[in-house]
Image (cartoon, rainbow, N blue to C red):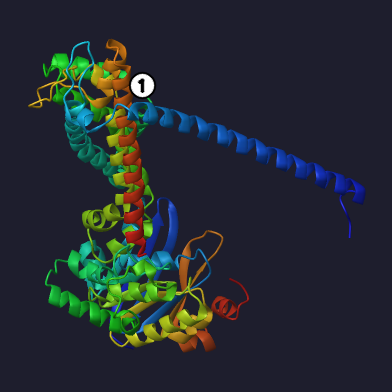
Amino acid sequence: MNNIKIETINYNLYYGKFHALRDINIKIPEKKVTALIGPSGCGKSSFLRTFNRMNDLIPGASMTGDVLIDDQDLFKIDPVSLRQNVGMVFQKPNPFPKTIFDNIAYGPRVNGLKDHKKLEEIVENSLRSAALWDEVKDDLNKSGLALSGGQQQRLCIARALAVQPSVILMDEPAASLDPIATLKIEDLIHELSQNYTIVIVTHNMQQAGRVSDYTAFFYTDETRTGRLVEFDETKTIFTNPSDQRTEDYITGRFG
Amino acid sequence: MTTLMSEEATERDLKMRKSSQKFWFAATWIFGAITFSILLLVIGYVIIQGGKAVNWEFLSTAPKGGLSGEGGVSTTLGTTLYLVLLTIGISTPLGVGAAIYLIEYAGEQSLTSPVLRALISIANFAVETLAGIPSIIYGLFGYALFVSALRFGWSLLSASLAGACLVLPTIIRTTEEALLAVPDDYRRGSLALGATKWQTLYKVVLPASLPGIITGVILSVGRVISETAVFFVTLGGSHRLPTSIMDGGRTLALHLYYLAMDTRAFDKAMGTGAVLVVMIILINLAIDFVSRKLTAGLKGR
């Protein structure tokens, strides 16, 4: 197995009295794509938000257990600096109502970078990494909202890359995109996994199969508490799962 | 295929429905036309009647004062301008700040403290209520507190403080609405990039809500220009241009009131009214222009 980037040990998540995730133990490998799959409401998005502490923003959320990132206690890291290391791409593209340049320069700027030369360099590199440079290089002063949905999502990926994170979380990044834009995002995810640890939540089985190296299957019963059923290499999960529920879900018998 | 009614009944019903729709369409058209004509009549009458009295001399000479009603409106224009600047200068930072607290911070803070939660709901209720209170009440309050208790006298200071109380609810409400209209996606996106809450507010949320906030401020400018009751009891009635914030004066609207009530110079009153109406029209055009311009800028058109 590869180096472990993120590890959770008996991790539990509560929203007020509601027990959202129970005893999650997982080791997410470095510079690989890990897909979180499972039926709606199984807590996979909540689990994803653990890694950049966006759950902290939800009133009443509390957690027990340990989450380690690079062997450090994640809950001891200040959320603001943690989020520089752990970027996030959301389900709906959410570029700011600013120019393309300012969208990408936003992260470096809030983290204190002022040097314009350096910002220009970061903007170009980030857009190149997000496979968007060629399409927008002449329009950097155009609003990010003027782009198409797929371009907006790649802009958001570029924006996340600009703060130079080592982990990128993606919450159904292609859910609102058409098939062609989706394909571009998937190619991009594949490309990015050479340099970044990627954790992606997806509802789309084929997508999980196409883009991920590892897959974690989450499941919930009538208690609505999410559990991790199985975690393995994606090809094992898809061809030879060890749990019946995983097989049922993957073959489309429910969910 | 089953039908609800016989063919004949269906046809009759359709005819009925069509004629009733025609009737109500005509009715709403007439209501609309009547409303529009009334508005046009008021504005048209004031501008046409008043327009005869308005010329450069009228705008550039000071009123003579006293009961004659002679002279122009120049000093009242100046006083109006001073009062607008002072009132907006006081109320905008207060109102925008209060709205930011209520929308962006109060929610999460009230979770931890029931006392704070109670205070915040009282504050919200107060803002709602204050917006609907007759303006003379603000005048009365301003007179009692600023003019007499604090001994500011009839002055720009007293009037602008009372005026600020008057427009605060408007500024708070429009700012609140503008902040609520900013999608949470922006806030989350910014926080996820390692921005602090304040950076998120300052760099993303406020710029995105700026058109709404500016609309509220310009609306308040219009309110100050057209307000009479509050300033009647706080600004005094001197026809001279105030030389300090402790000096009193009269705004255009107040001047109009004095002309109409105390003098026989009805033509001058109409002229002043016309100037006032044109100013308000210009302000509304400005709101339209600014919010359109800023919104287009945000959307990238």
Residue at 44% x, 57% y: name it.
Answer: A19
Q: What residue type is labelled 1?
A: Pro
Dot 1 falls on which chain?
B
Q: x and y percent of residue A8 in the render?
A: 33, 71
Residue ID for mark 1? B134
Residue A159 higher or lower than B95, as above or below = below
Q: x and y percent of residue B178 in the render?
A: 35, 47
Looking at the rendered image, the quarter that the N terminus of chain A falls into is bottom left
Q: Which quarter of the figure has residue B141?
A: top left
Say what secondary structure mark 1 lies in: loop
Residue A132 higher or lower than B52, as above or below = below
Residue A17 higher or lower than A88, as above or below = above
Looking at the image, which is closer to me, B292 or B157? B292
Residue at 44% x, 60% y: name it.
Answer: A20
Looking at the rendered image, the quarter that the C terminus of chain A falls into is bottom right
Q: x and y percent of residue A201 in the render?
A: 43, 73
Residue at 29% x, 16% y: name it.
Answer: B265
